[in-house]
Amino acid sequence: MRAPLLSVSRRLRPASAPRARTREGDNLHGAALMVISTIAFTTNDSLIKLASQTLPLSQAMLIRGVMILALLSLVARRDGGVLWWPHAARDRLVLVARAAAEVGSTVLYLKALQSMPLGTLVAILQSLPLLIMLAAAVVYRERLGARRLAAVGVGMIGVAMIVRPGSASFDVWSLVAMGSVVLILVRDLLTRALGPEIQTSTIAFQAALAVTLISLVMPTEPWRMPAAGELGLLALAAAFLTVGYIAGVATMRVGEVGFVSPFRYVSLISAGTLGFFIFGERPDGMTLIGAALIAAAGLYSIWREQRLRRVAG
């Protein structure tokens, strides 16, 4: 299960509610949590990429999934347990649809991760916040001005520079990566449609369970007894993914979103560093420029949104 880099499921305070005062040090605390979250996610990606080089992907997904479910069950127990049958029929349908999107996005992401440089894949994933902003304007009629719309366009130019359709470097895995981004977008929009009584731990546990179960029916090479080193890699991956999820949720509850959100782009640095030292990956100039455009567009859209909120408030 891949947790989103930008969550659209945050519960917004009512307009009449007083704005909570940010205590001294909260912004730095939130920024530290964001950095921990992004590094944990990219480290998980590196570990699962290493493990799936020798172990069938579906088997790696199953083993990691069982470990994550054990960890998430502890979190869910703290929240009163997993809500298996929500009262509202609409919430039940949305949870099923969201789980399907989670399964599709995870399988596509891991397939792309096996065949693409880690830094390139993470750079493509950074377009997600921009696409969520655009989709929210279309689906939920949220206001999107010309400047932020232009930022989305610049970000998509950056993606095109990385993917380079029609060039010799373009392959099917670029499309697989973009397909994963689209399904993550669908998943996050569905998350927003859930009722407020659905706990985050329930959403995460059910999604992780769906991904784990789908690994049992994926076509793959024959399974075998994993070596101790492979189990160790998967255990570390599960631990880092759980830390990334928990830190990512905690980030949005500490400090100001406008302050901590830009730190999500640390993942570009961590993915590039891990890709270089673990897999010997060296992104070319076009990929680096594309990643820079995506990051710049995302940072500008965050800054613009916060400025508009200050003016409105």
Image: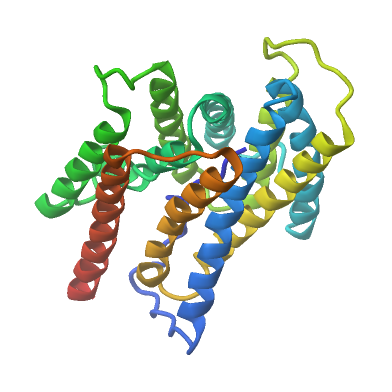
Residue 263 falls left or right of residue 155: right
Can you say whether 21 is above or below 102 in the image?
below
Residue depicted at x 33% and y 22%: 169
Can you say whether 180 is above or below 123 in the image?
above
- Pick whichever, 252 or 57, lies toward us: 57
- Pick whichever, 21 or 231, lies toward us: 231
Residue 6 visible from this viewpoint: no
- The percent coordinates of residue 207 (x first, y second) are 64, 36
Count the marks: how many?
Answer: 0
Can you say whether 75 is above or below 187 in the image?
below
Residue depicted at x 74% and y 52%: 76
Quarter of the picture containing the C terminus is bottom left
Q: Residue at the left extreme?
A: 146
Quarter of the picture containing the N terminus is top right
Residue depicted at x 81% and y 16%: 223
- The percent coordinates of residue 85 (x first, y second) are 69, 36
Residue 231 visible from this viewpoint: yes
Q: Quadrant of residue 52?
A: top right
- Pick whichever, 49 or 203, lies toward us: 49
Can you say whether 311 is above or below 78 in the image?
below
**Color scheme of the displayed model:** rainbow
- The percent coordinates of residue 136 (x first, y second) are 30, 44
Residue 60 falls left or right of residue 194: right
Q: Residue at the bottom extreme?
A: 24
Residue 313 falls left or right of residue 247: left
- The percent coordinates of residue 248 (x first, y second) are 55, 58
Q: Quadrant of residue 168?
A: top left
